[in-house]
Image (cartoon, grey):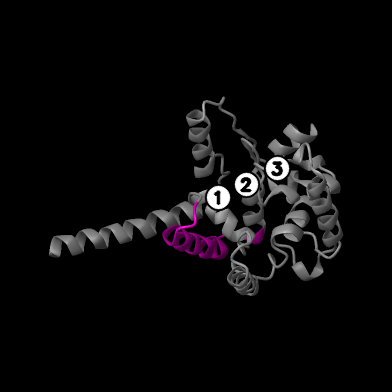
């Protein structure tokens, strides 16, 4: 019994030490690979497809400032105000899903939660994975700046079939770089994020174009992401 307790104690200590150290390290190091990238590669092999993984890490200053605005308008309007979780959105989603169980489940994940999931975890809806997501979200909110969270998010999120990050989608779909994406292109990319393997920013449907137009309207009410260390109250749009 003592051996079991001691073993469990060291497992817990090792878990917290390793996860905290990894979050600290990734506060400064580029994220070149994520679990999802490897999972998609295995899926491609299993389906008999050619391997495709397009990903180029670029610093936040090399990404069009319109892209953070577009994803905040589309995915997380309170990104700069919350501390990882939008409780009002969670309550709204829970109420809507309960009242309309026949409809597609409405999510309430913030950009911080999506970043934690993309970088440290695997896809899924189990309570275990969700618990880890809460844990890693809290860690990155404490240890990373909002700018770093956005930088990692825009570099790691899936933006098409085998395409990850702003620079890869800019090259693959618009023949440009992340830095030179237009406001309209940024809004179109953001419009696909709920399901980037179904919705295409390269060949957008009418539905995607409507989402793009809505996001562009909402971007007028979103402040640009302040630079690292800049006072958010003094920033300009």
State how far apart marks 3 and 2 are (Cα).
8 Å
Q: Earlier in the sequence, mark 3 or mark 2?
A: 2
Tally the marks. Answer: 3
Residue 26 visible to the viewer? no
Q: Is disc 3 surrounded by few (<14), some (14 to 19) or many (20+) residues within 10 Å?
A: many
Q: Name the quarter where the C terminus is drawn.
A: bottom right
Tell whether label 1 touches label 2 (CB within 8 Å): yes
Q: Nearer the viewer, residue 176 or 201?
A: 201
Residue 93, position as x, y percentages in the image: 62, 69
Q: Residue 60 colored magenta? A: no
Q: Nearer the viewer, residue 71 or 188?
A: 188
The magenta stretch spans which residues? Answer: 124-146
Magenta span dominant secondary structure: helix
Q: Name the quarter where the N terminus is drawn.
A: bottom left
Seen from this angle, which residue lies furthest front? 102
- Which residue is labeled 3 in the image? 166
């Amino acid at each position: 019994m003592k051996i079991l307790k001691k073993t469990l104690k060291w497992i817990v200590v090792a878990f917290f030490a390793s996860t905290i150290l990894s979050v600290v390290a990734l506060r400064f190091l580029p994220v070149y690979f994520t679990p999802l990238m490897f999972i998609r590669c295995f899926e491609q092999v299993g389906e008999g497809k050619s391997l495709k993984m397009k990903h180029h890490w670029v610093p936040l200053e090399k990404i069009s400032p319109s892209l953070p605005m577009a994803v905040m308008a589309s995915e997380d309007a309170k990104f700069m105000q919350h501390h990882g979780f939008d409780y009002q959105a969670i309550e709204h989603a829970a109420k809507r899903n309960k009242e309309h169980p026949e409809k597609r489940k409405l999510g309430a994940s913030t950009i911080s939660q999506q970043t934690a999931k993309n970088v440290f975890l695997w896809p899924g809806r189990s309570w275990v994975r969700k618990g880890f997501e809460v844990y890693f979200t809290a860690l990155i909110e404490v240890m990373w700046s909002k700018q770093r969270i956005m930088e990692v998010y825009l570099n790691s999120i899936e933006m098409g079939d085998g395409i990850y990050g702003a620079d890869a989608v800019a090259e693959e779909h618009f023949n440009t770089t992340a830095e030179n994406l237009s406001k309209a292109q940024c809004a179109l990319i953001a419009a696909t994020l709920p399901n980037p393997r179904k919705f295409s920013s390269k060949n957008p449907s009418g539905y995607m174009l409507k989402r793009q137009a809505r996001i562009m309207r909402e971007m007028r009410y979103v402040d640009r992401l302040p630079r690292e260390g800049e006072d958010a109250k003094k920033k300009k749009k």
